[in-house]
Amino acid sequence: MSQGITHFAVGGAVTAILAALVPDLPYPRTLVLVGGGWATVPDAVKLVQHPALAALHEHPIADVFWFHRTLDRLDETDSVAVASAALAIFIVVTSLLERRAYRAPESIHERLGTE
């Protein structure tokens, strides 16, 4: 099973990439955090022991939460190296997208004068 930070970092990075594809998306940074949280939902079984949560964590549907089950199967040793790599990728992706946002031309609202 992967560490929680691995799931959060992968979910946040994937969400950041998808958010970058949508022009003028409101609250993109908040959505990145929500995406990271979404990726950790199947780990709720670690907080609340319930058969339904345990079943969700082991079911293939857990991959809807940003590949949660696949990550757990690929990183069975709870590797700190994998968690560190995922976190580094998350930081690089969000930094590049943040830089892009600041260097982007004026928004459509500014061009149309509707803001």
Image (cartoon, rainbow, N blue to C red):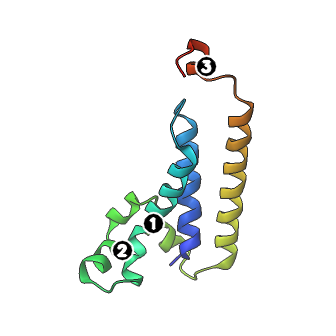
Residue at the image position 40 percent from the left and 83 percent from the top: 47
Give the spatial CA distance, label 2 vs label 3.
45 Å
Residue at the image position 31 percent from the left and 70 percent from the top: 59
The x and y percentages for residue 45 are: 36, 80
Residue at the image position 54 percent from the left and 30 percent from the top: 24
The x and y percentages for residue 28 are: 55, 44
The x and y percentages for residue 106 are: 66, 22
Give the spatial CA distance, label 2 vs label 1.
8 Å
Q: Which mark is residue 110?
A: 3
SS at mark 3 in the image:
helix
The image quadrant that residue 80 belongs to is bottom right
Q: Earlier in the sequence, mark 2 or mark 1?
A: 2
Q: Is residue 47 above or below residue 112?
A: below
Query: Observer-nearest residue: 30 or 49?
Result: 30
Q: Which mark is residue 68?
A: 1
SS at mark 1 in the image:
helix
Give the spatial CA distance, label 3 vs label 1.
40 Å
Query: Observer-nearest residue: 75 or 105?
Result: 105
Q: Earlier in the sequence, mark 2 or mark 3?
A: 2
The x and y percentages for residue 52 are: 24, 77
Residue type at mark 2 is His
Q: Which mark is residue 57?
A: 2
Disc 2 and disc 1 in contact, CB within 8 angstroms: yes
In the image, farthest residue toward the bottom: 49
